[in-house]
Amino acid sequence: MDPTSSTLGKMLLEEITPVVMVLRTPLVEESCRKNGLSFIQMIQPFSNFNNIDVPVRTASDQPYRLHQFKLRLHYASDIRQPNVEAAEEHLKDVVTRASENDLTDLNSDPPQLESLLRSAESESQSSRFQIFNKELIRASSFSEHEAFDHPVACLLAVSSKDDQPVNKIVDLFNTNEFPSLLNNGAMDPKILKYYLLIHDNQDGTSENATNIVSEMRGTFGSSDCRMLCINSAENGSKDWQDNPWSACSSDALLGQDLGCFLNMDDIDEIKDLMQELSSKHIIPHMEQKIRVLNQQVSATRKGFRNQIKNLWWRKGKEDTPDAPTGPMYTFSSIESQIRVLADYAFMLRDYELALSNYRLLSTDYKLDKAWKRYAGVQEMMALTFFMLDQSRKDADYCMENAFTTYLVRVLVFWSIDLEP
């Protein structure tokens, strides 16, 4: 069975994907809120591509094509590790709601109950497990010891109604909303940037907006700027059938029709925007970064001589967990570079390259007694073995090793550190 067709494979393709950090002005949100949506909610449904066709080359110059791709969009202020107590309560609520839904089915009329009994019990359990797993992943996201949650790109959105929009873009960089991953040195601040001008068609023609986007292109680069026109539907009349934002219905105001001022032209523009951002900017950027990092790692760490040199000079660190005040390794350290290389390769489906670098990193972290990072790399090795459809024994060993390390090495030290 193709690993990508399995439940786990689908989950990995859905959850371990590039993150885009979003910065926007209040007027951008104001225009989107007319539709009962935030800016991210408006564009998120169009960031998942199941029929994309983008040519990519591995670090060894072997061609292949990406046919499935997804971006995870997060406001800069939301890129932070969730509070542990709040995350635990949220997960308890998820389990409780799932149990209540099952109980509702069991208390239903006989025809529905009979249908439920005919369905496989494993299918119901699988569905609950998938829901819990997704929430667990989100509750443990944005940890400093894993790089696939580090933003690959930054999307900056300003409104044509903003006073001096170009200056507003500069102001967005001076925000205090940047994630702690960036502020504490765990994440490379030099990420891809894409600039977007939002024009609300309810505010009039786009003539002035066209002049603004021309100024933006002259300042930030012609290929990195784009204008998006929204709210083109008159009197809230929709010309589309299926609602792309149905998943947001729980967050909508009572009685509000999601996307009511967005017509098919607006939707097509949003689709084109996300397609262009993914296929012409983010994927090529990741591909190029993989090449650069692979060359650096090959020159300094791979090969018998480099490995012996690394083992000879590397000094084991104290048998303690990562310091709560910051990471053990900054983004510029060779260990962090290898982790980024491996995670980027995993997200672009070059699993052989990912595995070779996870192995290299696993040795480093073990020698350094950086147990949390060691466990995280062991997890990724197990998942990479799975996606390669290789040894089940190796995958099981790595996953068990990760679990044991988290339990024995990491949690024990944290509990000691928290004792009065």
Image (cartoon, grey):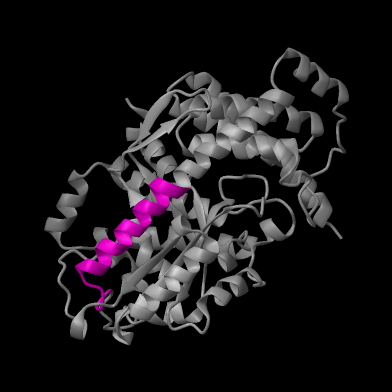
Vertical position of residue 406 compared to residue 182: above or below: above
Q: Quadrant of residue 209?
A: bottom left
Residue 114 drawn at (x, y percent): 15, 51
The answer to which of 264 and 34 lies nearer the viewer is 264
Left or right: residue 201 versus residue 390 is left
Residue positioned 37% across, 52% down in the render: 276
For the C terminus, give its image quadrant.
bottom right
Question: Does 145 appear in magenta?
Answer: no
Residue positioned 61% across, 34% down in the render: 292
Residue positioned 41% across, 37% down in the render: 8
Residue lying furthest top in this view?
304
> Looking at the image, can residue 32 be seen?
no
Left or right: residue 25 versus residue 312 is left
Residue 255 drawn at (x, y percent): 26, 83
Vertical position of residue 95 compared to residue 4: above or below: below
Residue 219 drawn at (x, y percent): 54, 65
